[in-house]
Amino acid sequence: MLYQTLLNTRSHVDFIKLDNVSKMFQNLTVLKKVSMEIHKGEFIGILGPSGCGKSTLLTLLSGLEKISSGVLHNNSTKGKSAFVFQDSCLMPWKTLEQNIAIPLEILNLSRQEIEEKVNKYLKILDLYKFRKNYPRELSGGMKMRASIARALVTDPEVILMDEPFASLDQILRERLVDEIYEIYLRKNLTGIFVTHNIAEAVFLCNRIYIFSFHPGQIIGQIQINKSNMDMKKYRNSDVFHQTCVKIRTILENSNE
Ligand SMILES: Nc1ncnc2c1ncn2[C@@H]1O[C@H](COP(=O)(O)OP(=O)(O)OP(=O)(O)O)[C@@H](O)[C@H]1O
């Protein structure tokens, strides 16, 4: 129900748009003529075989890399994007709360504001008890939750995630996916999620782009209408399984 209400209030204006974007590294064409649109408030999945340029696409969207040709419009607020990498990338010499505070210190917020925001996300991601611990004292799942907290603490408009759950066990992955989904709904985030896991993408995303192997080109786009779904039942629903099979078939056919 919450999902439906929020989706209805989200405007579908052009937010991020790629028009025939290609990316080359020296002579290697990694992405070829990619055209896509991402609307504010959408959660977009990027699926495709290893090496097809998914991570490269995120670096273009975040501005870390420049496009080689085509046009990239990005109407999100400058500096309001957050990146979650496959590795939690925490500073080993800082405690959890100190790690999560880093982006806020860069923004020069007051000590009190930093403490309030850090504590809020430590609680949301169930890490408050461990705030004084160092990364080496925590499990992989806790470190990944801390890395997600560090990304969310600045209230980003866009969150870019590059296989954030790859190193975690299935149950933990599903829990974290649920948590991200809740936060996404509450915060009016726009999400771009690179993954190899079809089921995770189908759960989290409202639209999925499927890429071919080398050079990466869009070979499929799947729209998922979850607006009337009870998310607790969605994972076991026919529509969920049918969507997974559809994506799998596109990926398998692209390899032949
Ligand atoms: N900075 C770079 N310089 C040169 N080549 C690069 C650079 N970054 C990526 N590549 C090449 O671009 C291609 C696509 O890499 P990318 O990491 O984007 O793929 P991917 O789809 O994310 O792969 P995976 O699923 O295995 O993570 C690879 O052949 C890689 O070697």
Image (tube, grey):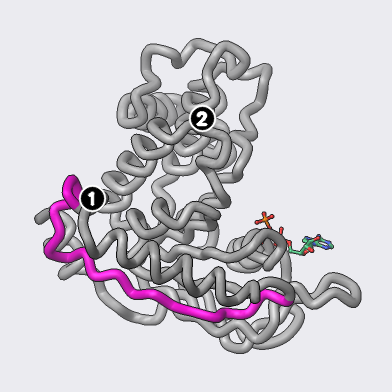
Q: Is residue 2 left or right of residue 234?
A: left
Q: CA distance from mark 1 to mark 2?
A: 38 Å
Residue 188 vs 95, above or below: the answer is: below
**Total marks placed:** 2
Is label 1 or label 2 in front?
1
> Residue furthest toward the right?
26
Q: Is residue 245 left or right of residue 36?
A: left
Locate residue 124, reporting x and y percent: 31, 31
| Circle on res. 254 | none
| Circle on res. 236 | 1
Which image quadrant for residue 225? Answer: bottom left
Residue in view at x 68 percent, y 71 percent: 213
Residue in view at x 18 percent, y 61 percent: 6
Which image quadrant for residue 34? Answer: bottom right
In which of the image's four quarters is ligand 1 placed?
A: bottom right
Residue in view at x 43 percent, y 52 percent: 156
* Boundaries of the magenta span: 215-233
Question: Which residue type carries mark 2?
Answer: Ala
Mark 1 and mark 2 lie on one chain; the one further toward the N terminus is: 2
Q: Nearer the viewer, residue 119 or 85?
A: 85
Mark 1 lies on a secondary structure that is loop
* Residue labelled with disc 2: 101
Residue 98 vs 52, above or below: the answer is: above
Residue 80 appears in view? no
* Residues packed near mark 1 inside 10 Å, few (<14), some (14 to 19) or many (20 plus): few
